[in-house]
Image: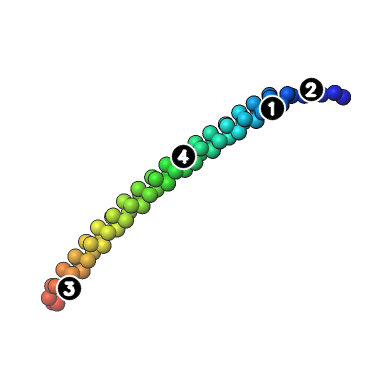
Amino acid sequence: MTGTTVTMDTFKWIVTGLLGTLVAGLGWFLSDILADLRDVRKEVMAIRVEAAMTNTRLESVIDDGRRRPAR
């Protein structure tokens, strides 16, 4: 049984194309993950700011409670 062979130039062209497609897909995938991480980072920062504001308000309420005379 004899089979047809592919020339080395054609083989290199096909492998280069497949590797290029793989690298492009991997780059797209990683950039998407990076964008998601940026979004998560922004949300975490917003939560930290809200927590700091809540702590400040809580401290002022506690201080007001301590300043009031006992009944």
Residue 66: numbered disc: 3
Q: Earlier in the sequence, mark 3 or mark 2?
A: 2
Name the colour scheme: rainbow
Q: Which residue appears farthest toward the bottom when viewing the image?
A: 70
Q: Nearer the viewer, residue 62 or 23?
A: 23
Q: Determine whether the residue tagged by mark 4 lies in a helix, strand or loop.
A: helix
* Mark 3 closeness class: few <14, some 14–19, many ≥20 residues within 10 Å: few
Residue topped by disc 2? 4
Image x and y of residue 2, in percent: 85, 23
Relative placement, left or right, of 34 versus 23 is left
Q: Earlier in the sequence, mark 4 or mark 2?
A: 2
Residue topped by disc 4? 31
Q: Which residue is found at the position 49% from the left and 36% from the top?
A: 28
Image x and y of residue 10, in percent: 68, 24
Image x and y of residue 19, in percent: 60, 33
* Mark 4 closeness class: few <14, some 14–19, many ≥20 residues within 10 Å: few
Q: Earlier in the sequence, mark 2 or mark 1?
A: 2
Give the amino acid type for the residue marked by disc 1 in the picture. Answer: Phe
Q: Determine whether the residue tagged by mark 3 lies in a helix, strand or loop.
A: helix
Front label number (4 vs 2): 2
Q: Nearer the viewer, residue 10 or 55?
A: 10
Residue topped by disc 1? 11
